[in-house]
Amino acid sequence: MPELSRTQIVVYAAVAVALLLVGARAIRGESTTDTSFAAATGGGSSQSSFSIGGEGGDLVVDVTGEVRRPGVYRMPAGSRVDDAVTRAGGAAPGAELEAVNLAARLADGQQVVVPARTPAGAAAGATAAGEEAPISLGTATVEQLEEIEGIGPVTAADIVEFRDEHGGLSSVDQLDQVAGIGPATMESLRDRLQP
């Protein structure tokens, strides 16, 4: 066997150390992935911890109104209103599902209200009886929002766009992020809207 020079030994040693480091990093990466998967699926030791990246963790929503099992439910991130209604046992026989945007994304802390179907004569009477009844923020149209004092067509359209971009709103206070809504308008909105 030929004798190796000092330079060759140093080069071989550097390559060997580099390979060991790359191998150790790969093994550590696989072990981290396995631990995350085990923690996510409920396996592994109780000492392992993991955090969910991406869109975030689970959402907690309150499903109420005309559903079979009203209550507070934990839903995966990215869930829709339809998923929450289904999780609550589906719509009850007297539900007015057409009044709910089932395709809207859920937000953490949101309340999903499935209203009751109103008799044909009662709808006309309710409109005539009181214009002051709160409007549902989850289903309000541009026209309904324009009826609120201080809200014009542009601001009403901005509110609907903001609601749709954020997958619904869990509080009227979130509307202070919409351009053109100041403190006085927020007071009007609090009086006339419900989440």
Image: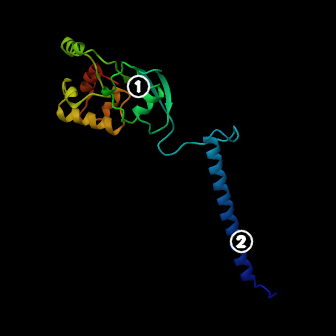
Q: Secondary structure beneath disc 2?
A: helix
Query: Is 152 left, or right, of 100 in this rendering?
Result: left
Residue 105: which quarter of the image? top left
Q: Is residue 10 above or below residue 40?
A: below
List the residue tagged with mark 2: 16
Q: Say which residue appears at 49% left-offset and 46% top-offset.
A: 54
At label 2, the amino acid type is Ala
Reply above or below: 176 against 4: above
Q: In which quarter of the image is the C terminus?
A: top left
Please tell me whether mark 1 sits on a helix, a strand or a loop.
Answer: strand
User: For residue 172, which numbered disc appears in the image?
Assistant: none
Image: 24 above or below 63: below
Q: How crowded is mark 2: few (under 14 residues within 10 Å), some or many (20 or more)?
A: few
Q: Which residue is located at x 38 percent, y 28 percent?
A: 170
Task: Give how far across and how far down residue 83 sits, in percent.
Answer: 44, 33
| Amino acid under disc 1 | Gln
> Which residue is rendered at x = 72% and y = 77% of the image?
12
Q: Position of residue 62 (x, y in %)?
A: 45, 24
Q: Residue at x 64, y 38 (%)?
A: 42
Q: x and y percent of residue 9 in the render?
A: 75, 79
Q: Which of marks 2 and 1 is nearer the N terminus?
A: 2
Q: Is residue 189 left or right of residue 22?
A: left
Find the residue positioned furthest to the bottom: 2
Q: Is 55 on the left or on the right of 121, as rendered?
A: right
Residue furthest out toward the front = 93
Q: Would you say 103 lies left or right of 126 here?
A: right
Q: Is residue 107 visible?
A: no
Q: Alpha-carbon distance for marks 2 and 1?
A: 60 Å
x%, y% of residue 120? 24, 16
Is any atom of residue 87 visible in this view? yes
